[in-house]
Amino acid sequence: MFFLKVIAKIPIVLGSQSPRRKELLTSLDLDFEVIIREIDESIPTEVLPQDAAEYVAVEKIKAFAEPGFFEHIVITADTVVVDGVGAVLGKPKNVDEARAVLSGLSGSVHHVYTGVAIAYRGQVKSFTSDTVVCFRTLDGEEIEYYLDKYKPYDKAGSYGIQEWIGRIGVEAIEGSFENVVGLPTSRLYEELKRIVLSS
């Protein structure tokens, strides 16, 4: 049977308040509800930068461990940006921090890691998707325009690749574009098929 017909019979929960993840999951033609559970998203020092997003995604999935979600598919995710020297760039606290982050990303290559966790019938599967993003050199006026108009304070790395800054600043990417937006849709679809059809 076609997988979408199978998964249509299973209630799906997206444990994320990100409007971008909601839009991407909707684009897979899946019906779901959004349920938010607040957790401590701090990352232990022993967790490597490339593993940080998956660590947080798994912590988020633990908040749905009660029996009422056993027959649900629960999906959680987190995205981190890691610069060329291995520093994790989270969401900026203010305009000054966002300006400093974008100035640092300008003219350089960085990694965007999205960690995803899926829970279904006692199984938990997690994975990380990595996309390499190359920015051209941005001038100060371009950075100020973007910060003033788009106010990217809810975005890891202080930018949204789907916004103006991505259109004019990103020279190349290696990997999934959707991953940079916040959810690696192709990999997620394959993992959903695997976990559902093996249950």
Image (cartoon, rainbow, N blue to C red):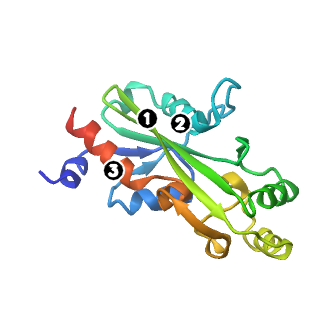
- Residue identifier under label 3: 189
> Mark 3 Cα within 10 Å, few/some/many (few <14, many 20+)?
few
> Where is residue 165 shown, x and y percent of the image?
68, 71
Q: Earlier in the sequence, mark 2 or mark 1?
A: 2
The reply to whether dot 2 and dot 1 touch (C-beta < 8 Å) is yes
Query: Please, what secondary structure does the residue beneath circle 1 have?
Result: strand
Going by the image, does 39 lie left or right of 184?
right
> Where is residue 57 shown, x and y percent of the image?
53, 37
Image quarter where the C terminus lies is top left
The residue drawn where x is 30% and y is 34% is: 71
Q: Earlier in the sequence, mark 1 or mark 3?
A: 1
Question: Who is closer to the viewer here, 148 or 174?
Answer: 174
Going by the image, does 13 lie left or right of 130?
left
- Under mark 1, the amino acid is Ser
- Under mark 3, the amino acid is Tyr
> Where is residue 17 shown, x and y percent of the image?
57, 50
Question: Who is closer to the viewer here, 35 or 148?
Answer: 148
Q: Which mark is residue 126?
A: 1
Q: Which mark is residue 54?
A: 2
From this view, report whether residue 139 is shown above or below residue 105. Answer: below
- Under mark 2, the amino acid is Glu
The residue drawn where x is 61% and y is 75% is: 167
Label 1 – label 3 distance at C-alpha: 13 Å
Label 2 – label 1 distance at C-alpha: 7 Å
> Where is residue 9 shown, x and y percent of the image?
23, 47
The residue drawn where x is 41% and y is 55% is: 185
> Mark 2 Cα within 10 Å, few/some/many (few <14, many 20+)?
many
